Image (cartoon, coloured by chain):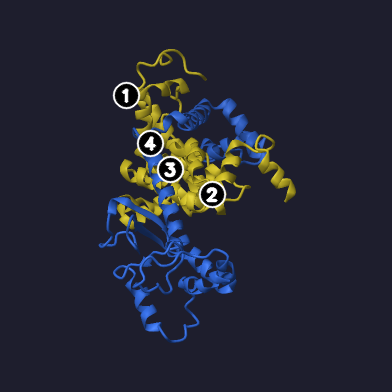
Amino acid sequence: MVNRELSCELVWKEISNYIEGDVDASLREGMDDHFRSCKGCASVLAGTRNVIELYGDERMIEVPAGFGQRLQRRLNQSARSRKSTWSTWSAWLVPVAALALIAGGLRWANSLTPPHPMLSEHAQPGHGIPPDMIVVVSQGAKDFHRPGCDVIHNKDRVRTLTAKEAIREGYVPCVRCLRKYVQVASAAHGSPEPQSSVEINAELDDRSLRSR
Amino acid sequence: MAEQNVVLNNPEQGMTREQELIALVQRGQNELFYELVRPYERRVYAAALAILRNETDAEDVAQEAMLKALANLRQFRAEARFSTWLIQITVNEALMRRRRERTGLMEGVDDRRDEEGEYAPRDFADWREIPSEALERKEVRQKLAQALASLDRKYREVFVLRDMEQLNIQETAEALGISVASVKTRLLRARLMLRDLLAGGWDQGWFSRLPFEKGTKPW
């Protein structure tokens, strides 16, 4: 038979494919015959299979001590930062969506929940403040601030809320940290409101609706 | 679609825990990701180590690969094996790291003469089987690891991905960006060389204290 004429060199060359089951039937038959009659090649086959079995064993993979804990910690850190990334996004997306809704007709809705009068009669209302901007107010004060503002009074007794809520409760924007909104309001005073600026204090302007 | 939802809602019916975890993480429960990858963390590390040969780099790349897998889990398709997908990401990360840091330059020279010529096994009549129980011994594991580490990079990488990470030939070729024919040739050489290295270990007394050493050969 032709199969019996396989050389040892050919068997060595194909031995890996033989183990993979990646040889055709004729070659497999010839190699089977060869292994039965050639102890040297049978030894190579046994040794190669043994190598595959040993290295394929899970115990062959050793990881440094604490590897799992460090991996878990890093994944957790990432999960937290991803959440904060999302909240950064949402901090922008939510006010944008909210502004769109307000522009679309929330004036009517606002009329149903009248705000408090401003706590300071001399203050100017904010203009264009994103309604969901996170702000802080402190007990006994009249202003609301961005977190971290230098002029927050009574810093250890602050409360966090949104700009919209602060305005509803009658707080007025801090002239330091929210200056740009106040200045815009001053500049716009007495002139028609720019079409593009849909502002929270429109709600305050609608206080007159309360009397209805 | 309705059928799929039924499966999702009944994890014990037709869904493995792994598939369930994948679905949950894909829907935003990132805190379950570690449970999903934990069974493979050792293999991910081993794949990175095979390419980088540095424990610190391998650990860092393993972590990076896991983060990348988490970020891209929505792209994972159910018809693929999750472990294979994870290993492929790891190999890619490790290869990029090596290219970036040029750590492969020292080893790169031998790639030019690839797998020309035939490889003839040495000591081919003198193999005694090493039982897998021997892996309980750290000394044995170290000798096996040393033998593997002594291989040229191109042989080591293919061997690790195919025989330790259990990727198939095609997947190994894709992960390393080489041809299937190259994988087969390198795999043959890696296996035969390791066999020779370990057979030589007998003579050097590597396994001298193993109970099975004495006696006749198994063939």
Mark 3 or 2: in front is 2
* Chain to which mark 4 belongs: A
Location of the C terminus of chain A (image quadrant) = bottom right
The earlier-in-sequence mark between 2 and 1 is 2
Residue A7's spot in the image, x, y percent?
55, 37
- Residue of label 2: B28
Three-letter amino acid code at disc 3? Ala
Residue B62 seen in render: no
Mark 3 on the same chain as mark 2: yes
Side of B188 relative to A153 (left or right): right
Q: Nearer the viewer, residue B11 or A100?
A: A100
What is the three-letter code of the residue carrying label 1?
A: Gln
The residue under label 3 is B47
The residue at which mark 1 appears reads as B204
Residue under pointer 4:
A69
Check the rendered structure and report the hue given to chain B.
Answer: yellow
Q: How many marks can you see?
A: 4
Q: Nearer the viewer, residue B11 or A24?
A: B11
Task: Give the colour of chain A.
Answer: blue
Number of other residues with Cα within 10 Å of mark 3, as a class: few under 14, some 14 to 19, many 20 or more: many
Is disc 2 surrounded by few (<14), some (14 to 19) or many (20+) residues within 10 Å?
A: few
Q: CA distance from mark 1 to mark 4?
A: 39 Å
Q: Amino acid at mark 4?
A: Gln
Marks 2/1: CA distance? 55 Å
Classify the position of the N terminus of chain A by image quarter: top right
Element class at badge 3: helix
